Image (spheres, rainbow, N blue to C red):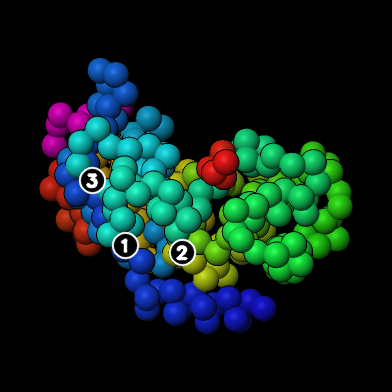
Amino acid sequence: MAGARVTRAREAEHRGTEIRFDGVSHSYGDRTVLADIDLVLSERRIGIIGVNGGGKSTLARMINGLVVPSSGTVTVDGLDTRRKGSQVRRRVGFCFTDPDTQIVMPTVAEDVDFSLRRSGLSREDRRRRVEQVLATYNLADHADHPCHLLSGGQKQLLALAAVLVIEPLVIVADEPTTLLDLRNRALVSETFAGLAQQLVVVTHDLDLVADFDRVLVVDGGRVVIDDAPAAALSGYRRIALHSGSGAGPGSGAGPGSGAGPGSGAGSDRET
């Protein structure tokens, strides 16, 4: 199964889902949280890291239209997240930090099936697809178990399964290991490594993104580093250890900034 998923991952990478940020800025009231973001994201595994309050979660939530920019555009394969939100969300699945916020049904199988309610599939086809995805993520033995009895890692895998069952092209995960112990972090990391889909992960867990294809560092509302993991993580450590607060959207790029690939000059389960 893992080999098949990796093969599909190569195909997905070749197909090249393209996520574009063009002149994107965003404010909450008077507070600007992102400014002048220009990015093209097409790699299979992309990490987004940065200090708290830097804007990384807002950036990630724009990919499937959970947040729409105050100015500029975000597109997924040419679909504007503002105007084509429903179509975008069929392509982009989102996993929240706390899986309890997106687990909505009493049992494991029911929760995954809930994602397929608008799929147009027959009851039997839905059952088969639910069984397949639960088996893939080692949840088959828990199909009829109450969701609240699962471990933290199992809940995170259930949330991921409920997203993957609709077969999106892109998975966005916002700090997916924050609530997990070491064992369950390893379980989620291993699962991510075998995903066929393009993966975008926001995290403080630097080990999780150490072997990704590309890592962005967001600080003060800007992408200040856009590079391969080793260089990006090194630059981020300098920023985190030596800067008091974010550079701020009105200032230049922070320490360690680079002009890496695509960098700029500067419950998601639809009802």
The magenta segment is 244-252
The image position of residue 8, as x and y in percent, is 51, 78
For the C terminus, the image quarter is: top right
Specify whether residue 14 is in view. yes
Question: Most prominent secondary structure in the magenta stretch?
Answer: loop
| Identity, as a three-letter code, of the amino acid under mark 1 | Asp
Distance of label 1 from label 2 (alpha carbons): 10 Å
The image position of residue 45, as x and y in percent, is 43, 63
Question: Would you say the residues marked 1 and 2 are in contact, meaning their CB atoms lie under 8 Å apart?
Answer: yes
Residue 135, label in figure: none
- The residue pinned by badge 3 equals 73
Q: Please name the residue shown 28% across and 37% down the image.
A: 69
Left or right: 268 in relation to 190: left
Left or right: 179 in relation to 10: right
Front residue (pair 244, 246): 246
Distance of label 1 from label 3 (alpha carbons): 13 Å
Query: 37 above or below 207?
Result: above
In primary-sequence order, the first of circles 1 and 2 is 1
Q: Residues within 10 Å of mark 2 (few under 14, many from 20)?
A: many
| Identity, as a three-letter code, of the amino acid under mark 3 | Thr
State the image quarter where residue 128 is shown: bottom right
Q: Please name the residue shown 41% across and 54% down the image.
A: 87
Residue 77, label in figure: 1
| Identity, as a three-letter code, of the amino acid under mark 2 | Leu
- The residue pinned by badge 2 equals 169
Specify whether residue 153 is in view. no
Asked if residue 251 is among those painted magenta in the image, a careful observer would answer yes
Q: Residues within 10 Å of mark 3 (few under 14, many from 20)?
A: many
Query: 174 above or below 166?
Result: above
